[in-house]
Image: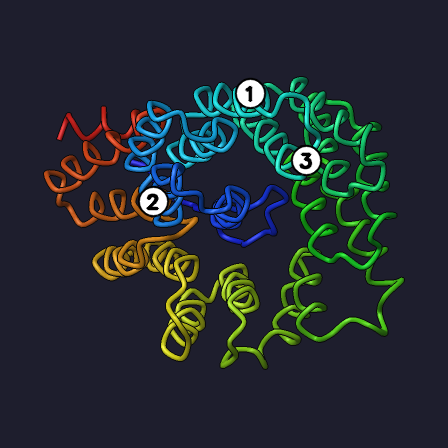
Amino acid sequence: MIMIEGKKIMHTVRISAVVIAAALLLGGCGKKPENKNLLAGMELVEQYDFQGALDSFDTALLNDEDLELVYRGRGIAYMGLGNYAEAETAFLESIKSAQGRASELVYDTNYYLASAYMKQGKYADAEAVYSAIIGLKKKEKDAYYMRACAVLRQNRYDDAVADFEKAFSLDSGDLDLVTDAYVEMQAAGFGEQGKSYIQDFMQKREKELKDGEKGIMYYYLEDYESARKYLDPFVNGNDASLSMILGQTYEKLGNMNYAAVVYQTYLGANEPDAAIYNSLGICLMHQEKYDEAVEAFENGIAMGSSDYLQELKFNRIVASEYTGDFSQARTMMEEYLQIYPDDARAKKEYEFLKTR
């Protein structure tokens, strides 16, 4: 049995989100009648029904619908299922079908391809894709940022720093870019260098920063008392990101009860948010309130379309284990592995469950 940690802080994703990609596809194909299976597949992607989407894309291929878009859609669906090798193949086919066109759609597909490489640990391949994008778009800050992540994983610290700093120079006011770079540097063991990015940003833009932004930056600087001071006024607000980080701040301060109150206050006053439900569930797990944690994860799952759907499903299984309901947890894990067959962590956990 494992204790979940989860994706606790919401970072801005540098690669286009699945729903955004779906919208691009729907717009790009012009809603042609002959592409009806493609459209159906992308609607299922928006609903996070990735297996159903693949079935529609298979039919689209049989009907000779737009190959560039169909293969792209298949890649996105495979990414959603965690099957990154198949996603790589699909994105390569999509790019091939573009026949050398350098459209915005092709650029975005290349970002997805690089993401599939990153997920598989093919960092040199990902770097090559980002370098190709930079070669054609010299001011593409996201490509510099992502290339920095790729080279950092290849232990090329100086190259990573150069790319991060180039990305900062292209958009000096992007707070998310700076905090994301910090997270990457910290994960690679260079937390102090990452903190210097935040400190430099604060010094240069101190007069422009809003209280919420200051709270975020103090959180990443691990000055949790200062973060709490600036974030506390947002406890009754409607900004999910600020509520998330405020809750995390109280967790870092050891006040799990109030962290749960922060999450519950947000959920009680605003539209449901899957990420907040996930963090609430994790917080309740740390308090050994396992039945309540299961309920929180189930509420997040019930929302359906969510970038957190896979994580919520896995966390619900682990929480069910802690309630002692191993039979139910085993059944849910079998269902989970049918949807996410390449999840190594889940496979290991299933072996444990089979002994119970």
350 with respect to 160 (left or right): left
Q: Is residue 223 above or below residue 35?
A: below
Q: Residue at x 56, y 78 (%)?
A: 234
Query: Circle 3 is placed at which residue position?
Result: 103
What is the x, y in percent for residue 119? Answer: 53, 27
Q: Residue at x 76, y 25 (%)?
A: 132
Quarter of the image for the N terminus: give it. Answer: top left
What is the x, y in percent for residue 163? Answer: 81, 35
17 with respect to 177 (left or right): left
Mark in the foreground, 3 or 2: 3
Mark-to-mark CA distance, 2 and 1? 22 Å
Which of the two residues, 67 or 271, is positioned nearer the viewer here?
A: 67
Mark-to-mark CA distance, 1 and 3? 15 Å
Which of the two residues, 154 or 282, is positioned nearer the viewer here?
A: 154
Residue type at numbered disc 2: Leu
Q: Residue at x 18, y 39 (%)?
A: 332
Query: Circle 1 is placed at which residue position?
Result: 92
| Mark 2 or mark 1: whose residue is earlier in sequence | 2
Residue 44 is marked as 2
Q: Is residue 110 above or below residue 128?
A: below
Residue type at numbered disc 1: Leu
Secondary structure at numbered mark 2: helix
Secondary structure at numbered mark 3: loop
Residue type at numbered disc 3: Ser
Evaluate if marks 3 and 2 touch, with contact meaning CB atoms under 8 Å apart: no
